[in-house]
Image: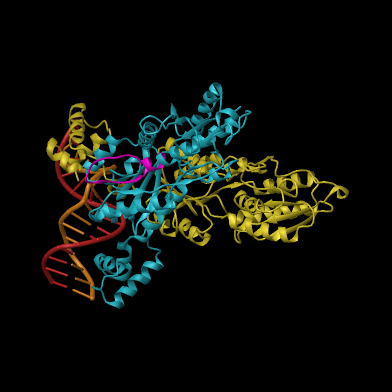
Chain colours: A yellow, B cyan, C red, D orange
Amino acid sequence: MVSIKDIAKKAGVSISTVSYALNGSNKVTDETSSKILAIAKELNYVPNAAARTLKKQKTKILGVFLTDFRGDVYGDLLHGMKEVSNAQGYDLIVCSGKQSHRMLPERMIDGAVILDQMFESEELLKYADLGHKIVVLDRELSHPNINHVLLDNKAGATLAMEHLIEKGHKKIYVLTGPEGSYDSAQRMKAVRLVAERTQDVEWIAIPGNFEKSGGEKAAEQIMQEYKEPVAVFSLNDEMAIGFINRIAETELRIGEHIHLIGFDNIELARYMQPRLASIDYSKQKWGALASEQLIKLIAGESVEDEQIYVTLADGGSVGPAIKKAESV
Amino acid sequence: MVSIKDIAKKAGVSISTVSYALNGSNKVTDETSSKILAIAKELNYVPNAAARTLKKQKTKILGVFLTDFRGDVYGDLLHGMKEVSNAQGYDLIVCSGKQSHRMLPERMIDGAVILDQMFESEELLKYADLGHKIVVLDRELSHPNINHVLLDNKAGATLAMEHLIEKGHKKIYVLTGPEGSYDSAQRMKAVRLVAERTQDVEWIAIPGNFEKSGGEKAAEQIMQEYKEPVAVFSLNDEMAIGFINRIAETELRIGEHIHLIGFDNIELARYMQPRLASIDYSKQKWGALASEQLIKLIAGESVEDEQIYVTLADGGSVGPAIKKAESV
DNA sequence: TTGTAAGCGTTATCAA
DNA sequence: TTGATAACGCTTACAA
């Protein structure tokens, strides 16, 4: 590997002069500088990241940790993160799995964005205590080195519930996320609140997992119990898709016998027949804000937690309730 | 930051002893070793990646470079890469964008997998010349430090064309990928071959871009020229989806007036109405093989290029041609 | 303007 | 079994 030492030798100068020249310092004559640059190019010199990092104690790299590389929410989110990171002179790397956690404490990255329920809060707090900078998107954690960019889960769940109620539905199944999911818990809180303050609304929780399989299982249960049209609020779209897939094998029709609304408004939602109603938000903005927060945190600037606003994405999967007399 | 020096001081031993203990060398007494380990834990010691890398000249990290984080093919591919990488003691990081290319020459990763048309071959060859190990998934590059895991594009395109022909279609529009795309060029070769050896088949190329917008534009053109049922081979699914979206706004029906087949069999394909026929292959295996090849390349083992086999995924988007007399 | 040298945190060689 | 020390490639304070 060619190092500044090689360049120094060939140019007949010291390594510090080479370093200065390479970093565009004005301490060096234009003449020597250009000579050094020419030689560096000729030798195909590339600086060594490890050496630079060791000396400067920073990498100018941000890491984002995901539960799984598969998953429909990620594309736009990562894109948003990348845009902001790059604009601010940071590179972005995407990691997944427990094995990769070391990147943070070993200082291969200057900070981390977490969207991974499997990354334990205890571990995160430990790293934060060691001085590492973290932005979390999927939980609340009180620590000076940790910031939050969270979805407005309560608003979203409220919107969804009210939409179903407005359409006249009285019996609402709610498919939850996995145990321990912050997003699921927050959404459930709002569900309870809305139900409590509304007359005549019955709601039944079905434990889910935020994956297609959870939706399929829920579909089985609801089919069994089916007597008359009901509504379903799936706490994410992924499960809603699984639900639809299973229901499609039956006589029941979405938007007619079963009125379904999801959460996340993933790309697939608009291709469902009928279109899956859902709660929408800008995934790209979510990522952009996360990067922004993290970079500020690293720079030692004061930062306030942020929220991502949500809206209702209407769809034929939720139709009006038929009055009792007319129902099947 | 706590370093081995701090541990050494506290334990009253030298830094080399600490290093040995930490790395589980049997040169150290169990007694001193466990004492050192205890102190390390107590001080929350975490090794510094930059220092280790600088000394060992390897990172045990693999990088994969994508054009864009959005894109439906990636999830399973990355998952496959991760499984193999982790099993072999490597971490995987995902990068996108020109800015991140430096990770390879600056030695932040031990090798790279390329699925990014924007990453120029010239640049790759330069890095390969410098001794960096690379596996490409989207082109052919002859270099001892570069290996290939390529789709069987020709088989795929042949399968698609033959499927259309078998169904009796005589006029076939082919939506190509962007200029310079290896996959597109390979698929086009097969298209030509099949057309040449088949009687009475007319085919018309429409330049595309492998994105939804390309499919939409092509739809416009075909609508304009429409006289009687035609077939369309979209060289990827993404464009096919765009095509479907645009056609959905017209009187024309996919699988009836326009018979469409794609390539990649992305998840969305099965949710199209009617289901989008496509060319299928295991994205996960593709990724797994890529990691495998790269790790071997890094280890200096001899490796042979690999191919990913493809199959036809049938779907209602391709129906039989109606005989002339019966056509509209 | 350029050179000398210390130091970043490891690993690994050689002596003790 | 342990310790002293050089080396990895770079940045930067200080000296010349």
Q: Left or right? Give the position of A13 relative to B105.
A: left
Q: Position of residue B236 (x, y in %)?
A: 46, 37
Q: Left or right? Give the position of B323 relative to A251.
A: left
Examine the rendered structure and indicate whether residue B38 appears above or below residue A272.
below
Q: Left or right? Give the position of B298 relative to B72.
A: left
- Whether the magenta-drawn stretch holds residue B194 is answered as no
Q: Residue furthest top?
A: B224
Q: Position of residue B31 (x, y in %)?
A: 30, 78
Q: Position of residue B34 (x, y in %)?
A: 34, 74
User: Which residues make up the magenta segment?
Assistant: B138-157
Examine the rendered structure and indicate whether residue B19 appears above or below residue A77.
below
Relative to the observer, which residue lies in front, A293 or A41? A41
Q: Position of residue A218 (x, y in %)?
A: 66, 58
Q: Residue furthest right?
A: A325
Q: Left or right? Give the position of B296 relative to A193.
A: left
Relative to the observer, which residue lies in front, B70 or A220? A220
Q: In the image, what residue occupies the spot 34% across and 60% down?
A: B89
Relative to the observer, which residue lies in front, B58 or B183? B183
Task: Say whether residue A57 is visible.
Answer: no
- Whether the magenta-drawn stretch holds residue B144 is answered as yes
Number of on-image labels: 0
Task: Say whether residue B252 is visible.
Answer: yes
